[in-house]
Image (cartoon, helix red, strand yellow):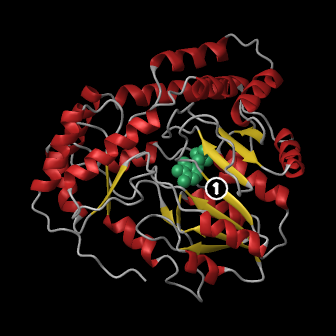
Amino acid sequence: MWIRRRLDIGWTDIAWGCSRCLLPGALEENARHRLESAWAGESDAVACLSVRTGFDLLLRALALPPGSEVLMSALNVPGMFRIVEAQGLVVVPLDLNPNLSPATEVVRAAITPRSRAIVVAHLFGARADLTPIRSLAREHGLVLVEDRAQAFDGLPAAAPEGSDAALYSFGTIKTATAFGGAMLTVRDPVLAERIRSLERALPPQTRWEYLARLLKYAGAKVLTGQRTYTTLCKAFDRAGADADAWLQRAAAGFRADGLLDAIRHRPATPNLALMERRIQRFDPARAKHQRQRGGRLAASMGHEFPVAGDPITHTFDLFPLRLGNPRAVQAALREAGFDATMRGSMTTAPCSNENPTATANAERLLDEILFLPLYPAMPDEELSRMASVVHESGEPPLAEKPWQ
Ligand SMILES: *Cc1c(COP(=O)(O)O)cnc(C)c1O
């Protein structure tokens, strides 16, 4: 069984991380300095425990008046919306097109005198089109934040021109994972300094806590290995249990209750060191390679099977295929040994009573998209086989519904 996604880290890196926990020596300041200066060159970078930690710090540092509106891509992990609400701010969803970007008109219509910030998420490896959004943000004096948690594709990872901040995750299920950790890039040095001092005031994660994390996910890596996972799936099937739900729960990371307490920590020194190692050793050709493979897979399926996002800039963190009947194709793929999945850990933004349909398109996307596995370990022949299973599933092409 080709699992939906692999933990993107090798045993050497895990062992190296464990050794840093057991044989401390590096000073926190040094590890942090090395990581932050390797990261972004000219922009100010702050290493954090997670993207959610960095986002929370950023909002606290901005100190927006209560009731301020934060415009956000309508799809994200639940914690990102909750962090905004926990600070007394209002989430205003920006509904998405099938290219996974909010339309310019949608953004324009969402701006009110209370708007203060826009958060655009680059989803599933696709790159949202920011050009029109940047001019709107400038015109209305809004802080533009890019959620690049799923979009790390190598150094240099400075915040792109025209954005105020960008967030990158090295969490468990992300590319080049360090089983935790994130980088926040901030353009304004004054804001960066404020974030840094708030970050310094957080209680630290101890190296023992980080070691426990490394060991826990090393265990998960064993269970999700090719052979073991196949056996596990069969066992779950026989027991009538749902391996899917089990995996989703296991990957959830921080518990939903007490989210703020969980994220408001500083990363342990070995976590900073492993993050640095992962980004320094990241193969710069990998994103290009993945883009080519995704492009070939899309082409081999044909026009009637559209991919969510722009295939030209996509790095296919997963392969998001839009289908009329994704459940049927999911069953066919499973039968053939491909663990395709739906929805993942994403949710739609909370809607206000005045605008209950503000996330209608995003909901529709979640119902349509089947995420096919696509990672470096899958050989080209298997990708072709996966494409034929989709083709031969006999599912009619997606009935294109009108998108307003
Ligand atoms: C994973 C993810 C996050 C959260 O990242 P953490 O580092 O786990 O907090 C935020 N946004 C998106 C789009 C993500 O995929």
Which residue lies at the image location 43% right of the left edge and 75% below the top edge?
A: 361
Which residue lies at the image location 78% right of the left edge and 83% below the top edge?
A: 113
Give the secondary structure at mark 1.
strand
Q: How many marks?
A: 1
Q: Position of residue 348 (x, y in %)?
A: 50, 68
196 on left or right of 344: right
Q: Nearer the viewer, residue 327 or 99?
A: 99
Q: Residue type at mark 1?
A: Glu
Mark 1 highlights which residue?
146
15 on left or right of 339: right
Decide: is 7 above or below 72: above
**Is the CB atom of the residue marked by disc 1 within 8 angstroms of ligand 1's nearest atom?**
no
Instruction: Give the quarter of the figure containing the C terminus.
Output: bottom left
Instruction: Give the quarter of the figure containing the N terminus.
Output: top left
Residue extending farthest to the bottom is 354
402 on left or right of 66: left
Q: Position of residue 2 (x, y in %)?
A: 26, 37
Q: Nearer the viewer, residue 386 or 198?
A: 386
Decide: is 337 above or below 332: above
Whether residue 52 is visible, yes or no, is yes
294 on left or right of 35: left
Q: Nearer the viewer, residue 340 or 312?
A: 312
Assess disc 1: are there few (<14), some (14-19) or many (≥20) residues with their C-alpha within 10 Å of its C-alpha.
Answer: many
Whether residue 337 is visible, yes or no, is no
Which residue lies at the image location 38% right of the left edge and 60% below the top edge?
A: 308
Decide: is 7 above or below 195: above
Q: Quadrant of residue 98?
A: bottom left
Q: Position of residue 235 (x, y in %)?
A: 21, 37
Which residue lies at the image location 43% right of the left edge and 50% below the top edge?
A: 314
